[in-house]
Amino acid sequence: LILSCAFPLQGRHRRRSLSSSSPLFSEMSPATAATGPQWFQHEISITAPSRGCHLITGEIQKHISKDLSKIKIGMCNLFIQHTSASLTVNENADPDVRRDMEVALNKIVPATWNRDGTFLHTMEGDDDMPGHVKSSLMGASLNLPIRNGRLALGTWQGIYLNEHRDQGGWGGGHTRNIIITLQGMA
């Protein structure tokens, strides 16, 4: 059994492997080791062009397609390493849905709460604390099934990166890091 992980290294992906002789797999039978689970991990950066909900399904698939194609049945976990951006699955066909999602989130958690005394954490801008709340409501991770080498999304489903800040945090941009972990059986 080979456990393979792809990691970026100065703009490139680096692959690390653990063999079946690793202590992690020492108690597996030879039959289990030959057909055991495969693990792959990628770290990608995606730049959101602006605040709002952005469809990133194609970008995710582009980065994982080689490893994804090796898995017949499994799971894909996506985790965004930020506290004012989030991930979700929703409508992928009509762009009005993405716009409406942003409008709804702004009504649920308005930026005015940063000025009216509702929030105490206000020094990073009017959109910062509302961004933290929206991120918690939407979530930092997704688990998606893998079937026959593909993400098993529904016909009208897509993966969204939800950028909740105008400035994207201290750095002034909207670049967000996402860890993608694939696991499954060949």
Image (cartoon, rainbow, N blue to C red):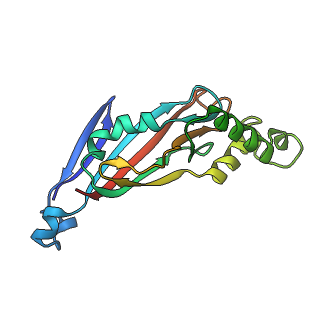
Q: Which of the 4 quarters of the picture holds residue 112?
A: top right
124 vs 181, left or right, is right
86 vs 155, left or right, is right
Q: Position of residue 71 (x, y in %)?
A: 27, 52
Q: Is 151 situated above or below 96?
A: below
For this rendering, which residue is in front, 151 or 33? 151
Tally of numbered discs = 0
130 vs 48, left or right, is right
Q: Position of residue 43 (x, y in %)?
A: 39, 41
Q: Position of residue 139 (x, y in %)?
A: 59, 52
Task: Check the image and name the residue furthest to the right.
Answer: 116
Query: Where, quadrant-wise, is the N terminus in this rendering?
Result: bottom left
Task: Check the image and name the residue furthest to the left.
Answer: 30
The structure residue drawn at horizontal position 54% and vertical position 35%, both measured from the top left corner, is 55
Q: Position of residue 97 (x, y in %)?
A: 66, 38
126 vs 13, left or right, is right
Q: Is 49 situated above or below 119?
A: above
Query: Where, quadrant-wise, is the C terminus in this rendering?
Result: bottom left
The structure residue drawn at horizontal position 58% and vertical position 25%, both measured from the top left corner, is 49
The structure residue drawn at horizontal position 27% and vertical position 45%, both measured from the top left corner, is 69
